[in-house]
């Protein structure tokens, strides 16, 4: 379904849209705006997914018993050692 609406653009945005349509990147200004909106929707979905994953990881780590914690210095030391080993090969 297509809905007609009225949009206002700054001169800069209008020039950009007109240029992209003139270059054949988009068939019309409407299709350019639609593409921008689709990108915004994808960006928001990806952000929501990333935040959900991060929240799940935080919840998981909060359930880790204190005795299983790894000290930061130890974790980084192990990472540094692994990096040094990989550089030698």
Image (tube, rainbow, N blue to C red):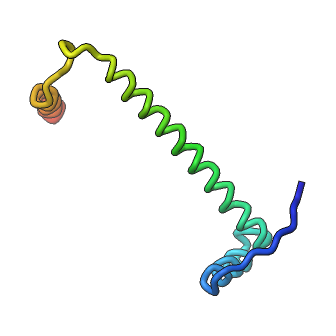
| Residue at the bottom extreme, as displayed | 11
Q: Is residue 74 above or below residue 29?
A: above
**Place of residue 20 in the rendered image (x, y in percent of width and height, measured from the top left):** 68, 75
Identify the residue at image location x=33%, y=17%: 63
Q: Residue at x 83, y 69 (%)?
A: 5
Whether residue 38 is visible here, answered yes or no, is yes
In the drawing, does residue 45 fall left or right of residue 25?
left
Nearest the viewer among 6 and 35 is 6
Q: Position of residue 58 (x, y in %)?
A: 37, 29
| Residue appearing at x 49%, y 34% in the figure | 52
Residue 74 lies left or right of residue 21; in this view the side is left
Q: Is residue 37 above or below residue 67?
A: below
Q: What is the number of callouts on the image?
A: 0
Quick check: 39 above or below 6? above
Q: Nearer the viewer, residue 26 or 29?
A: 29
Whether residue 78 is visible here, answered yes or no, is: no
Q: Quadrant of residue 23?
A: bottom right
Residue situated in front as seen by the camera: 84 or 65: 65
Figure quadrant of the C terminus: top left
Quick check: 41 left or right of 31? left
Using the rendered view, name the quadrant where residue 36 is placed.
bottom right
| Residue at x-position 25% and y-position 13% | 65
């Amino acid at each position: 379904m297509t809905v007609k609406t009225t949009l206002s653009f700054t001169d800069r945005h209008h020039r950009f849209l007109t240029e992209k349509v003139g270059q054949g990147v988009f068939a019309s200004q409407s299709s350019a705006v639609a593409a921008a909106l689709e990108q915004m929707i994808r960006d928001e979905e990806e952000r929501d997914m990333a935040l959900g994953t991060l929240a799940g990881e935080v919840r998981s780590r909060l359930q880790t018993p204190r005795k299983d914690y790894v000290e930061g210095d130890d974790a980084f030391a192990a990472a540094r050692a692994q990096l040094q080993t990989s550089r030698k090969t």
